[in-house]
Amino acid sequence: MPIPQLEVGMALVIPDVLAESCATRQALERLSAKWRILLIYALLDGSQRHAALRRRLPGITQKVLTETLRGMESDGLVTRRVFKDTAPQHVEYALTTLGKSLETPLTAICDWAVAHADRPPRAAATAQRDEA
């Protein structure tokens, strides 16, 4: 089934992210889970153990961290490497090539956030209404 697309101008074709079959929409839904982007940022520093990730992400529970890492592993964003099978188990998580490929778009989002950090939320909403 072809992916629905919207034509913008003459040269740029962007996917219709409102369509459920859109690959972009599916990627956004996967990445929009609260902890996934933060875990990607943490793992951009290199492979880390479960406990180290918990320390870097205050507020995440052990259960949610485990579930999120498993989901990211099944999506091909993270690899899980077991160094020691016996208790206490030594397991490290690292980004795959696919996971690392998110660094550039996430950097662009960070740059955008920093550039607009001084704009109060209410002012942004007013500016948006005025532009419409």
Image: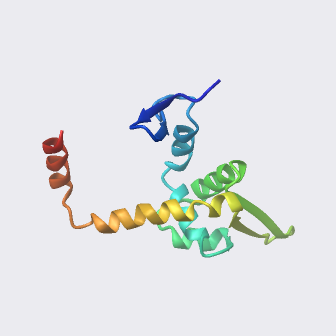
Q: Is residue 127 above or below residue 65?
A: above
Looking at the rendered image, the quarter that the C terminus falls into is top left
Disc tally is 0
Q: Residue at x 47, y 33 (%)?
A: 16
Is residue 62 found left or right of 10 in the rendered image? right
Q: Is residue 86 above or below residue 70?
A: below
Viewer-closest of 126 and 75 = 126
Q: Residue at x 63, y 71 (%)?
A: 51
Check the image and tell me how it is coloured. rainbow
Quarter of the image for residue 100 reads bottom right
Quarter of the image for residue 82 reads bottom right
**Percent position (x, y) of residue 127?**
16, 49
Is residue 100 found left or right of 131 in the rendered image? right
Q: Residue at x 41, y 65 (%)?
A: 110
Viewer-closest of 66 and 118 = 118
Looking at the rendered image, the quarter that the N terminus falls into is top right
Q: Residue pushed farthest top?
A: 1
Q: Residue at x 39, y 67 (%)?
A: 111
Is residue 92 found left or right of 24 in the rendered image? right
**Percent position (x, y) of residue 98?**
67, 57
Q: Residue pushed farthest front?
A: 10
**Percent position (x, y) of residue 35?**
52, 56
**Percent position (x, y) of residue 123?**
15, 54
